[in-house]
Structure formats: C-alpha cells, structure tokens
Amino acid sequence: MKEIRYFYVPDPGCGELPSDEAQHAVRVLRLGAGAELVLVDGSGTLHDAVITEASNHHCRFAVTQSRPQEPEWHGTIHLAMAPTKNMDRVEWFVEKATEIGLDRLSLLDSQFAERRVVKTERLERVAVAAMKQSHKAWKPVIDELEPFAAFIRRVDLPEQRFIAHCYDASDIAGDTAAAEKPFLLDVLERNRPALVLIGPEGDFSVDEVRKAEAAGFRSVSLGTSRLRTETAALVAVHIMRLANR
C-alpha cells in the first residue's frame, strides 16, 4: 500500500507548505514534484494535494480534492489540568490525548501547582505531530495558563462540568453522611459538551474543590487507583471519548 504523508496546513488556499513542513517534505522525506500529500487544516477537513514545485526553501502544491470529515464523537471534550513540574509528562499527555480525541486543553494555576509558567508553543507542536500521526482532522485548542479561581468563573464553560479529586465526599461537605463521589462514566450524558478538571500531584485544595462545586462543578471519581496528574487527565479524556462514541 502506497504511503501518503500528512502535513499541517491551516490555510490550504495559500498553495504552499509552511516553512517547517516544507523542510520536512523536501529535505527529510525528499519529496518532489508529483508527490501526493494529504493536508490537514486542523479545522475538520482533509485536503488531497500534489506537489507542483519543490526547492530548498519552498514546497508548493495544488489541492485536488477537499474532504470534510464527520466528527468521530459528539459534544466537546474539554480537559483542564494543572501542569506537572516535568513538562515531558504534559507533552506525553497532549500527544496521547490528541490521538484519542480531545477538543480543548486548558492549563490551570492552582494552589498546589508545581509549575507557574508554561510555553504553549511546544505543546502546539506536539499536538500537530500527534494529529498528523493519528490522521485526525481537528487540532485541539490549547489555552494559556489561567488562575484556577478565574477559570471556574468563566461564562463559556459547558453545563456538564466535573472536578476529579482524591478527597472523600465527607472531607468536602464536612458531613460524614455525605454521598460518595460517582464514577465519571456513570454521570456523563452522551452527546453533550463536557469538561473535567484535574489537579496537580498534590491535588486541588479542599477550598478549591468547594469553590468549584459552588460554581456548578460536580465531584467525581476516576476509579479506585491513585493516578498521576497526566494519567488521570488521560483517563478522563478516554472516559469522555467513550461516553460520546
């Protein structure tokens, strides 16, 4: 089977690969005029194309067919997490979540956060590479780091919103008779936008959980295992993906 290479071109109407994609096509893959490509615009459409001119500095193409893709899931899958101190683990999450299916990633500066500064340019590159590798037509939106308190007050958040944490329900409610947290998959409604918050290695603070619940977030469990931040985030994405299959 002939291998077709995928390239990220946000505006296929420009007729030319972005410089980094052009260098990969010409200098690394040694593609020349006549080679077939698939262009991914990151907004839901794949474009079949053929190279018309290739040089050390430019790679021009002609689109032969545009193929709008049907979403693989219904509703919006939105994950908000406190980034880990080791950015390699955040990049691993972005790669795997993009492959599984993620619409939006928000980064939270919470009370026990291990990292206060994040350069999203690198995460964007990781998402683009994962999108091309997994033949996805959509690139997830990646938001800049935002204070937790400001994020939970945003007006554009979906009605279906959850916060995953390790506390018992009684720790949050101050009532030993409080009902246990439900498993996320059991309370997700299919075909509706959903958002899950994931805390840092030290978890959200009790005060943050209470404020989130007051803002309309529902406390949920991701299972009985104690998970690292990036693992918990990926589990949450996978559950949302399964609920919207």
Image (cartoon, rainbow, N blue to C red):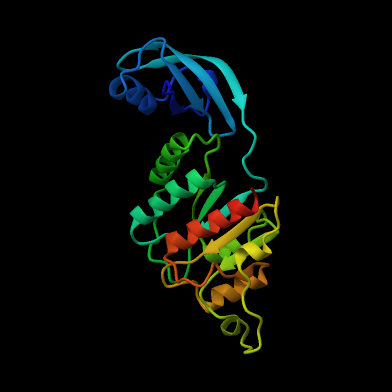
Counting from the top left corner in percent of width and height, residue 106 is at 52, 54
Classify residue 160 by image quadrant. Answer: bottom right
- Left or right placement of residue 234 versus residue 212 in this view: left
Note whether residue 79 is visible.
Answer: no
Seen at 53% across and 78% down, the residue is 167
Residue 47 at x, y percent in the picture: 54, 22
Is 191 situated above or below 235? above
Instruction: Tell me, yes or no, if residue 54 can be seen here.
Output: yes
Q: Quadrant of residue 151?
A: bottom right
Residue located farthest toward the front when viewing the structure as drawn: 1
Q: How many marks?
A: 0
Nearer the observer, 5 or 149: 5
Quarter of the rendering containing residue 159: bottom right
> Residue 9 in the image: x percent, y percent?
48, 27
Which residue is depicted at the point 52% across and 36% down?
136
Nearest to the observer: residue 38 or residue 85 = 38
Q: Does residue 96 sit above or below 108 in this rendering? A: above
